[in-house]
């Protein structure tokens, strides 16, 4: 029970509260959608057209899932083309136009012919990878859906061919390419520097756990003991997964020192906007070959590229895993040393965490490899996608001198303790000064505070004069421990009737 007592007002507050690290400012300067801005300038279209194409690409995900489930033997894959015309190509091993027509009449989707089904390509890649790993042959592999081809990248060609001889004799869509190296990992608001004793990396997205405690992501191969730029106290390591499909860890800020703001934002280094608000998550099932993704890193800065391979497979730290590979839309590398752990995004959606870049001799030396964002759930965390804000307080009509509860609904994950301020823009019974209280207990939405309609009544001489009906305008402001303040919300409270008056 919390007591707030402004002049002529008695407030009894009972709180059921809440819980957000993106470290940094909340500036909104710059373009509204950096991804669309970049796309429009690279492909020579309007930003409206760029947003339209992005929506079409996202809409392709449920269509692809339906087709893959219903036509596994003939579905050859799906990819996006941006030039000379925007289109989404859906491939089948037979009757492509007839099969596609069963699922969509949208002219953006066009049918193509594939020699092999996607199911066959994935199965062949998995079988070849398992055989090479069993024999201790180092490798990476990738799928070229456009050419219906599986390629294994190896250093020891003789050993690889000897191991894969039965497979190579059974199919004609497997290639072996000799390389000098494999994927190189490229090592708190996402997009900022986090430094350990041996490596400097980039922070990813702000996240929160089941207890609504906030933290920050980076790559699993980065140092566990690290400091965030501009914060004296080291970050506190929580957990990591660093093998196979997973290259991710997360940290909380130190319990000592001032709280750092953590909002649903990332920093764009040398980008068209200083920050980007993250409002959703796009899993790998919603992404396709040819889709545009962007990233920010402490070394490679802001850049965008197109997805080249959804199934890049490698033996990462002793376990076979799959990552997504993207290529820069402009000249130069999309990922360099120091970018590891940085955010990969599409428009305002989180899509992944930077894993590395291509190895020497692969032809992918400038390409970026990233871990799909849905895999962060292995750490028991979720990406922060909502700003801290009060979403509503309903108008109330209540009797005098009877306590009642007022629900305050909110979004986001603020840091506790929370500072609550109540004030009255209009106070009909005289001046009412603002009252502030600190709330320490974390609780979910809605917050509930108990209020009492109060008004002085005359008890002597009789008769008793009951309070007149009055409408009070209430303004509620919340501010979390890091200084993030939700916009004030106002509501009307009508006080009338006094059944308990003498």
Image (cartoon, helix red, strand yellow):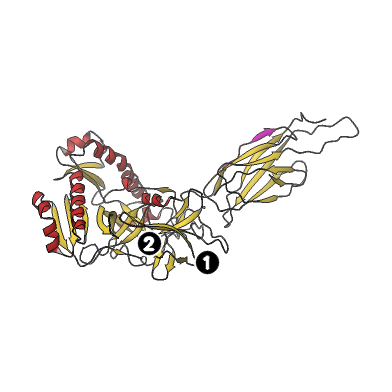
Left or right placement of residue 332 versus residue 480 in this view? left
Q: Which quadrant, please, contains the N terminus?
A: top right
**Which residue is more in the foreground, 3 or 197?**
197
Query: Are dots 1 and 2 in contact, CB under 8 Å?
Result: no
Quadrant in the rendering for residue 335: bottom left
**Label 1, on which residue?**
233
**Which residue is more in the foreground, 402 or 24?**
402
**Label 2, on which residue?**
302
Q: Does dot 2 land on a helix, a strand or a loop?
A: loop
Q: Tell me if mark 2 has few (under 14), some (14-19) or many (20+) residues whose alpha carbon lies within 10 angstroms of its own.
A: many
- Mark closest to the chain's N terminus, 1 or 2: 1
Left or right placement of residue 398 versus residue 444 in this view? right
Residue at figure coordinates x 33%, y 44% from the top left: 58
Q: Does dot 1 land on a helix, a strand or a loop?
A: loop
Left or right placement of residue 458 versus residue 143 in this view? right
Q: Residue furthest right?
A: 461
Question: Is 320 inside the magenta-drawn segment?
Answer: no
Q: In this orientation, does residue 145 appear?
A: no
Q: Nearer the viewer, mark 1 or mark 2?
A: 1
- Rendered view: 368 above or below 196: above
Residue at figure coordinates x 14%, y 62% from the top left: 159
User: Which stretch did the figure color magenta?
Assistant: 392-402
Measuring from the top left, give residue 365's x and y in whole percent. Answer: 25, 65
Q: Residue furthest left?
A: 169
Q: Tell me if mark 1 has few (under 14), some (14-19) or many (20+) residues whose alpha carbon lies within 10 angstroms of its own.
A: some
Mark 1 and mark 2: Cα distance apart in space: 27 Å
Quadrant in the rendering for residue 120: top left
| Secondary structure mostly taken by the magenta-highlighted segment of the chain | loop
Q: In this orientation, does residue 456 appear?
A: yes
**Which residue is more in the foreground, 438 or 37?**
438
Residue at figure coordinates x 39%, y 52% from the top left: 376
Measuring from the top left, give residue 8's x and y in whole percent. Answer: 77, 44
């Amino acid at each position: 029970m919390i007591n707030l007592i402004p002049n002529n007002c008695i407030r009894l507050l009972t709180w059921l509260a809440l819980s957000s690290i993106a470290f940094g400012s909340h500036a909104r300067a710059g373009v509204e959608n950096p991804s669309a801005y970049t796309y429009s300038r690279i492909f020579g279209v309007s930003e409206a057209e760029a947003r339209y194409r992005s929506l079409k690409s996202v809409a392709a995900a449920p269509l692809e899932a339906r087709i893959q489930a219903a036509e596994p033997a003939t579905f050859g894959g799906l990819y996006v083309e941006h030039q000379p015309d925007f289109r989404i190509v859906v491939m089948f091993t037979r009757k492509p136009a007839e099969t596609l027509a069963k699922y969509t009449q949208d002219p953006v989707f066009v049918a193509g012919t594939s020699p092999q089904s996607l199911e066959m390509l994935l199965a062949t890649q998995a079988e070849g990878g398992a055989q090479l790993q069993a024999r201790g042959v180092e490798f990476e592999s990738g799928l070229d859906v456009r050419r219906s081809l599986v390629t294994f990248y190896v250093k020891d060609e003789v050993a690889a061919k000897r191991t894969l001889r039965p497979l190579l004799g059974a199919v004609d869509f497997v290639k072996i390419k000799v390389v000098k190296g494999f994927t190189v990992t490229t090592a708190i608001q996402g997009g900022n520097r986090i430094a350990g004793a041996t490596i400097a990396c980039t922070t990813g997205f702000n996240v929160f756990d089941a207890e609504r405690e906030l933290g920050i992501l980076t790559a699993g191969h980065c140092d566990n003991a690290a400091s965030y730029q501009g914060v004296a106290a080291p970050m506190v390591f929580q957990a990591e997964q660093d093998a196979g499909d997973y290259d991710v860890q997360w940290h909380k800020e130190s319990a000592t020192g001032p709280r750092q703001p953590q909002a649903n934002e990332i920093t764009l280094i040398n980008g068209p906007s200083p920050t980007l608000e993250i409002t959703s998550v796009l899993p790998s099932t919603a992404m396709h070959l040819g889709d545009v993704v962007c990233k920010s890193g402490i070394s490679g800065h802001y850049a965008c590229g197109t997805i080249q391979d959804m199934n890049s497979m490698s033996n990462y730290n002793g376990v076979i895993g799959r990552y997504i590979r993207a290529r820069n839309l402009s000249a130069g590398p999309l990922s360099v040393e120091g970018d590891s752990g940085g955010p990969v995004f599409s428009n305002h959606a989180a899509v992944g965490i930077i894993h590395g870049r291509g190895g020497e001799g692969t032809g992918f030396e400038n390409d970026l490899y990233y871990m799909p964002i849905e895999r962060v759930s292995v750490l028991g965390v979720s990406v922060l996608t909502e700003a801290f804000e009060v979403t509503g307080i309903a108008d109330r009509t209540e009797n005098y001198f009877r306590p009642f509860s007022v629900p305050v609904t909110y979004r986001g994950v603020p840091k506790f303790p929370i500072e609550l301020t109540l004030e009255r823009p209009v106070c009909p019974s005289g001046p009412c000064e603002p009252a502030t209280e600190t709330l320490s207990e974390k609780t979910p939405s809605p917050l509930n505070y108990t209020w009492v309609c109060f008004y002085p009544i005359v008890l002597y001489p009789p008769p008793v004069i009951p309070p007149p009906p009055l409408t009070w305008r209430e303004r509620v402001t919340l501010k979390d421990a890091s200084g993030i303040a939700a916009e004030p919300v106002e509501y009307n409270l009508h006080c009338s009737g006094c059944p308990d008056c003498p």
